[in-house]
Image (cartoon, rainbow, N blue to C red):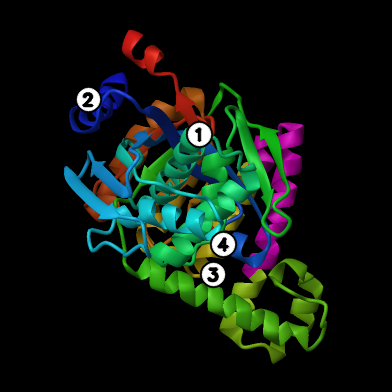
């Protein structure tokens, strides 16, 4: 890890000089509450010990100069006027933040940034949110802007919505920026009130199984699901005009009108209404330290995502089925937007090695393909790293 950060530091020093801040911005897992954030619902994510690392400094000009260590690509642009999107793709996550800061009235000048990560790209662990949050946090620190946590998350989300052009909810940016070591974060995506729940049992590990499948479908279908939820709300409003989003819908109302609702829309709505309930109940489980019950809700969440919300895929389903049959597993489900990426598994510490070997082997037997397995730890949200500590380690 230290070596990895030192590489970023060296690149910065060679390109831009000795003065900079070093920022760590984590990826996230989501324990439960999938596709609920854009329905004004509840989510239970946590920041993890894999993320994006950035060396960043203001440069006193109107130019931004970036270098992506993993891609070995450099990018430079003038930010005095309207900011243009880059065809390279990755600079847009940084430029989107600049664009939003300007729109929020912050006087953003030129800056230099070198970054790299150890969070797998496209695996559903929110590398993009980590990058956006990292740049935002770095710029706020360098400029002495005191931006409250909730506003930080909304600026980063808007950067992604408006500049990158992905209509994501707020979960990823919020979790990456505001995570806390040893705690999961329950977020009410309507009020943006949040609460930390201890998640620090040494005997239980969060293990991710990465199908390594990255599908374009994910973003187009994501937008379709959002529209279907909106359509659901419109339909349901005729029976209860108070309904503003699926967050407000009672299961009984939905079931009462099942015959009158388009069957696909019905399935989508039912999943979201039930998933919101599961998040609340899962938080009670955490309070009581009942991981068996928590794990069962993870399995239920997966079934809903598979059969009702229809954002899973064969490979994710196979991984969850294998996990169910292995010893020491409390629960498993697909994580993130879907159609590929990872499953999240809660596994008893003493079973983690056997779990890893067996799930790799059985998946390979069934599909002929390989998975990657990552063990993660619940860690702090975006923060500055003390440079002296990195070099003295
Ligand atoms: C992606 C989005 C999040 C959320 C999840 C699904 O990760 O970025 O906002 O909607 O999908 O829960």
C-alpha span from label 4 to label 2: 40 Å
Q: Which residue is mark 2?
A: 10
Q: Residue at x 70, y 66 (%)?
A: 273
Q: Which residue is mark 4?
A: 35
In primary-sequence order, the first of circles 3 and 2 is 2
* In contact (CB < 8 Å): disc 3 and disc 2: no
Q: Which residue is mark 1?
A: 141
Query: Which quadrant does the N terminus fall into?
Result: top left
In primary-sequence order, the first of circles 4 and 3 is 4
C-alpha span from label 3 to label 1: 41 Å
Q: Which residue is mark 3?
A: 309
Q: Going by the picture, which residue comes out furthest to the top?
A: 392
Residues rendered magenta in the picture = 271-294
C-alpha span from label 2 to label 1: 21 Å
Instruction: Determine whether 312 is above or below 114 in the image.
Output: below
In primary-sequence order, the first of circles 4 and 2 is 2
In primary-sequence order, the first of circles 3 and 1 is 1
Q: Residue at x 32, y 44 (%)?
A: 61
Q: In terms of secondary structure, where does tag 1 sit? A: helix
* Foreground label between 3 and 2: 2
Q: Residue at x 26, y 45 (%)?
A: 65
* Foreground label between 2 and 1: 1
The answer to which of 269 and 323 lies nearer the viewer is 269
């Amino acid at each position: 890890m230290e070596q990895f950060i030192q590489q970023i530091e060296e690149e910065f020093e060679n390109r831009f000089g000795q003065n900079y801040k070093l920022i760590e911005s984590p990826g996230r897992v989501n324990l439960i509450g999938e596709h609920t954030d854009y329905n004004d619902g509840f989510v239970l994510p946590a920041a993890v010990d894999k993320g994006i690392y950035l060396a960043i400094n203001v440069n006193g000009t109107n130019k931004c100069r970036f270098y992506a260590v993993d891609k070995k690509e450099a990018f430079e642009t003038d930010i005095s006027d309207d900011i243009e999107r880059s065809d390279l793709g990755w600079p847009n996550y940084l430029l989107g933040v600049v664009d939003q800061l300007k729109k929020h009235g912050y006087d953003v000048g030129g800056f230099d940034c070198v970054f790299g990560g150890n969070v797998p790209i496209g695996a559903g662990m929110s590398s993009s949110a980590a990058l956006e949050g990292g740049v935002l946090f770095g710029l706020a620190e360098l400029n002495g802007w005191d931006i409250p946590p909730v506003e930080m998350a909304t600026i980063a989300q808007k950067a992604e919505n408006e500049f990158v052009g992905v209509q994501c909810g707020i979960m990823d940016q919020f979790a990456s920026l505001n995570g806390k070591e040893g705690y999961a974060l329950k977020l009410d995506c309507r009020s943006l009130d949040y609460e930390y729940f201890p998640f620090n049992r040494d005997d239980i590990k969060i293990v991710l199984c990465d199908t390594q499948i990255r599908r374009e479908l994910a973003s187009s279908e994501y937008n379709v699901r959002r529209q279907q939820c909106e359509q659901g709300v419109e339909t349901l409003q005729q029976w209860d005009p108070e309904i503003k989003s699926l967050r407000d819908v009672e299961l009984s109302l939905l079931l009462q009108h099942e015959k009158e609702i388009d069957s696909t829309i019905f399935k989508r709505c039912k999943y979201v209404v039930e998933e919101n309930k599961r998040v609340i109940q899962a938080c009670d489980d955490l309070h009581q330290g009942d991981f068996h019950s928590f794990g069962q809700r993870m399995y239920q969440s997966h079934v809903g995502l598979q059969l009702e919300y229809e954002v899973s895929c064969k490979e994710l389903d196979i991984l969850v089925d294998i996990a169910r049959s292995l010893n020491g597993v409390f629960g498993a489900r697909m994580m993130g937007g879907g159609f590929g990426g990872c499953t999240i598994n809660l596994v008893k510490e003493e079973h983690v090695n056997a779990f890893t070997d067996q799930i790799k082997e059985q998946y390979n037997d069934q599909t002929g393909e390989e998975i990657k397995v990552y063990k993660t730890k619940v860690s702090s949200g975006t923060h500055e790293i003390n440079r002296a500590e990195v070099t003295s380690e």
